[in-house]
Image: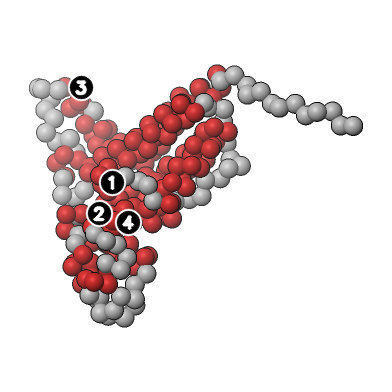
Amino acid sequence: MEAGTGRLDVPAVVAASLAIADADGLENLSMRRLASRLSVTPMAIYHHVRDKGELLDLMADESLRALPPLVASAPWDSALEDLFLGFHRLYLAHPALAQIMTQRPLEGPHAIAVGEQVLTVLSAAGIDDDTAASAFISIVNYTIGASLYRTSRSSSRLPERRRFGRISAADAPRAHGLRQTMAALAVDEGQFLDGLRRLLASYRMDAAAAPARPTTARAPAG
C-alpha cells in the first residue's frame, strides 16, 4: 500500500477501522480519520465502501473470518459452544464489533454462511425449523448481550461500577453481601460459558424429545 494512493485491500481497511473504533469509539471513526491512519486520501477509502454504514457492515462481516470453524463431526452442542465462545472472545477483543451488531443488519456473505451452518447443525440434531430459528436468535442475543456486559464491567473507566461499589448493606443486604462474587463473575469467561451451556441444554432437551424423522425406504433391488 503506497501513501496517497488507492492501493488498499479489505483486511487493511478493516484492521485500521477496528483499531480506531476500539480505541476511541465508533462515533470517532470517520472516513477522513481512517484515511489519515492508512496514509491515503479519503477518496481511496471510497473505492471500497460508499459510506460509513457500509464500512461498519464490512468490519462486522470480515471480522467473522477469525471465528473457529464449526466442526460438523463434533456433538452439535459442543460445536455450537466452541463457535459462540469464539464470537464472545472476538467481541471482547474488539468491543466495537458487538456494538455494530446491535446497530446494523448482519447480512454479509460470511455472516450468512455462519448462520446457515448453525441452522444446519440444529436441524441435523433433530430440532424442528421453528425451534432452530428460535435457538439461533436466542444464542446470538445472549452472546452479544453477555459480551457487551462483560466489556462494560472490564473497563478501567468504570472501576466503581465494576466492583458494585454503590450497593449498600442498608438498602440491599443480600446484594451487598454478594457484591464481590458478582463483580468477579461479571468479568469471568466461565460465567459466559455456564450461561451458554444452560441455554444449549434447553434445546438439547427439545432435540431429545423430538420424534424420530422417517427415513425413506429403498426399493428392493432387482
Q: Residue at coordinates 39% horizontally, 51% vertically from top-left?
A: 108
Work out whether mark 3 precedes mark 4 in sequence or the reverse, and give the earlier one.
4
Per the rendering, the mark at residue 59 is 4
Residue 214, image quadrant: top right
Figure quadrant of the N terminus: bottom left
Q: Is residue 164 left or right of residue 195?
A: left
SS class, disc 3: helix
Residue 114 spot, x, y in % from top left: 46, 46
Residue 33 spot, x, y in % from top left: 19, 67
Q: CA distance from mark 1 to mark 3?
A: 39 Å
- Three-letter residue code for mark 4: Met
Residue 140, image quadrant: top left
Q: Residue at coordinates 19% horizontally, 54% vertically from top-left?
A: 25
Q: Residue at coordinates 21% horizontally, 48% vertically from top-left?
A: 155
Q: CA distance from mark 3 to mark 4?
A: 43 Å
> Residue 8, relative to residue 179: is it above or below?
below
Q: Residues within 10 Å of mark 2 (few under 14, many from 20)?
A: few
Tell me, yes or no, whether the two marked residues, 2 and 1, touch with CB atoms within 8 Å.
yes
Q: CA distance from mark 2 to mark 1?
A: 8 Å
Q: Which residue is mark 3?
A: 174
Work out whether mark 2 precedes mark 1 in sequence or the reverse, and give the earlier one.
2
Tell me, yes or no, whether the two marked residues, 4 and 2, touch with CB atoms within 8 Å.
no
Work out whether mark 4 precedes mark 1 in sequence or the reverse, and give the earlier one.
4
Q: Which residue is mark 1?
A: 104
